[in-house]
């Protein structure tokens, strides 16, 4: 009987330790590739490219078959991921050329900024591409968007992925570096983790690879490996080697996190900013051999190949391994999901377009309050607005005069016309029965078409009115 209080104390302490472990804020790591096609990974069906490290993440967590970026082009996609808001709603309409006036506004709250407020150490390493006037006082830089430490380029690694010369570290030009961009990006992240003073604080890492965006450069031994494996088209072996080199960089960081015992309580996402680049679409793109798999179209299009991308999520302490999910989710959900994981609330003074995915990670139903929606004015082909609701997808064009054109020519009059444009020329697809979007059900499913049109019109008008007038 004398031992009962001690047993009670031990039992109580054990419960407390379990509760503390459950309530710990997780580390958050995002691996974001650039122009990686839906079909470019072995775990998504590529027959030649070897991606053992990313494949292992898929086995250790959830591989989503229906994961979406927030736009079919890079800058807009990144802005949507960082903020949880449709990019056009916040004025990032397209990719941002160097020295351009477009940028992610400082008034927007990124997930890094929100996590920093909650006590996280934050860093980004890789491609920024959320402003045109990079490393200049005229526009917000990564440190203005919540990152304690940043090692970045404005857009692509230059002159290529090999020995780049255009990285900036916390506002200071770094100069020529030795090595390949993806490996340099991971080395920077590891060095930051080693040197940060608060080793007991949770951290957020935004790892934004340049690979496999042009101009591609890959280790010669990997290029030769794929030539030997049968890659015969010009540039094909270089592309395959580029993806494998990126995969090796992912493996290095994951292994480091495991060795330092960070990994078990790390919520990690692997994805891409948009679909694969089209071969020879522009000068210098001769190595773009990415695959959309069975999806229709590629980067810049509003069909699935433009923005359905790889999406793999792991969190060893919370997510059961070996899952494959066909629930439609995407980068638009990251902001709310990361806030929920960190046990903090999103700001209440703005509209969010995503959902909290934590219940889905635990096998529960996803509570998505509105359809997924895309609004990209410079899309190739006709459709420039898209919406997915359950199994169904609706596409529409803009009726009026706001035609796409060079970003520098978007005038005040152009934006005024954009505000009054209407939707037209609808296309309706069932993505469960028709993954490649070959059968337009617009004429055979009138009730479904009418239902989807009503929902799209509501979202379109909301985003259309929110979209700020460009001043560039």
Image: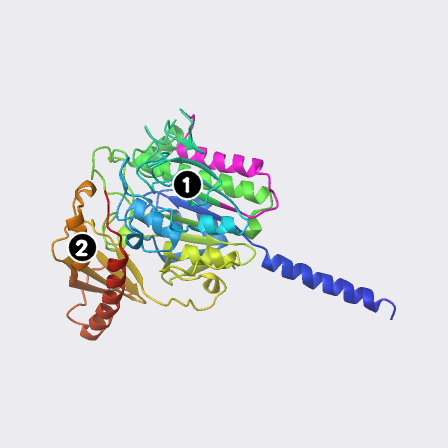
Q: Say above or below: 380 vs 425.
A: above
Q: Residue furthest left?
A: 401
Q: Which of 223 and 418 is in front in this view?
A: 418
Distance between the alpha carbons at the discs numbered 1 and 2: 30 Å
Identify the residue shown where x is 16% and y is 51%.
Answer: 381
| Residue 284 place in picture, x, y as percent | 24, 32
Nearer-N-terminus badge (1/2)? 1
Q: Please, what secondary structure does the residue beneath circle 2 have? A: helix
Task: Specify start and end residues of the magenta stretch as a single range.
Answer: 177-204
Q: In which quarter of the image is the C terminus?
A: top left
Q: Does the magenta stretch include residue 179?
A: yes
Q: In which quarter of the image is the N terminus?
A: bottom right
Identify the residue shown where x is 24% and y is 55%.
Answer: 303
Q: Residues within 10 Å of mark 1 (few under 14, many from 20)?
A: many
Q: Can residue 45 be seen in this view?
A: no
- Where residue 258 sits, quadrant-wise, is top right
Q: Is residue 30 magenta?
A: no
Q: Can residue 191 be seen in this view?
A: yes
Q: Say above or below: 215 vs 119.
A: above
Q: Please, what secondary structure does the residue beneath circle 1 have? A: helix
Count of residue discs: 2
| Residue 174 place in picture, x, y as percent | 42, 27
| Residue 32 place in picture, x, y as percent | 39, 45
Q: Which of 83 and 16 is in front in this view?
A: 83
Q: Residue under circle 2? A: 418
Q: Say above or below: 139 vs 448.
A: above
Q: Residue 142 carries which label?
A: 1
Q: Which of 324 and 427 is in front in this view?
A: 427
């Amino acid at each position: 009987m004398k031992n009962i209080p001690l047993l009670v104390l031990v039992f109580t302490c054990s419960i407390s330790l379990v509760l503390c472990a459950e309530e710990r804020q997780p580390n958050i790591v995002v691996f974001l590739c650039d122009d990686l096609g839906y079909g470019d990974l072995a775990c998504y069906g590529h027959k030649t490219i070897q991606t053992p490290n990313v494949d292992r993440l898929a086995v250790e967590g959830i591989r989503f078959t229906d994961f979406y970026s927030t736009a079919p082009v890079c800058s807009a996609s990144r802005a949507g991921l960082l903020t949880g808001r449709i990019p056009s709603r916040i004025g990032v309409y397209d990719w941002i050329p160097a020295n351009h006036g477009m940028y992610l506004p400082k008034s927007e709250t990124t997930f890094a900024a929100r996590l920093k407020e909650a006590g996280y150490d934050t860093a980004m390493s890789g491609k920024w591409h959320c402003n045109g006037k990079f490393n200049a006082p005229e526009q917000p830089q990564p440190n203005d968007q919540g990152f304690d430490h940043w090692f970045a380029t404005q857009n692509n690694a230059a002159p290529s992925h090999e020995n780049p010369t255009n990285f900036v570290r916390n506002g200071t030009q770094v100069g020529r570096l030795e090595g390949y961009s993806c490996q340099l990006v991971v080395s920077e992240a590891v060095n930051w983790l080693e040197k940060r003073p608060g080793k007991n604080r949770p951290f957020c890492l935004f790892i934004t690879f340049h690979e496999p965006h042009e101009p591609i450069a890959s280790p010669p031994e990997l290029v030769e490996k794929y030539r030997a494996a049968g890659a015969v088209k010009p540039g094909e072996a270089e592309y395959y080697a580029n993806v494998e080199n990126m995969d090796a960089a992912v493996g290095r960081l994951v292994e480091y996190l495991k060795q330092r015992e960070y990994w078990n309580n790390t919520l990690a996402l692997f994805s891409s900013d948009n679909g694969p680049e089209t071969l020879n679409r522009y000068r210098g793109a001769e190595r773009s051999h990415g695959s959309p798999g069975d999806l229709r179209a590629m980067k810049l299009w509003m069909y699935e190949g433009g923005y359905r991308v790889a999406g793999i999520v792991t969190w060893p302490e919370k997510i059961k391994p070996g899952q494959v999910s066909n629930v439609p989710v995407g980068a638009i959900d990251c902001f709310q999901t990361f806030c929920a994981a960190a046990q903090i609330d999103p700001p209440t003074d703005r509209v969010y377009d995503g959902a909290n995915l934590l219940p889905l990670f635990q096998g529960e139903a996803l509570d998505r309050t509105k359809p997924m929606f895309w609004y990209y004015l410079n899309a190739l082909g006709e459709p420039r607005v898209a919406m997915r609701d359950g199994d169904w997808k609706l596409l529409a064009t803009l009726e009026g005069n706001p035609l796409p054109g060079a970003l520098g020519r978007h005038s005040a009059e152009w934006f005024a016309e954009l505000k009054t444009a209407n939707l037209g020329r609808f296309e309706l697809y069932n993505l469960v029965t028709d993954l490649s979007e070959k059968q337009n059900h617009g004429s055979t499913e009138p009730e479904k078409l009418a239902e989807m049109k009503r929902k799209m019109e509501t979202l379109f008008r909301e985003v259309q009115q929110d979209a700020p007038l460009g001043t560039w």
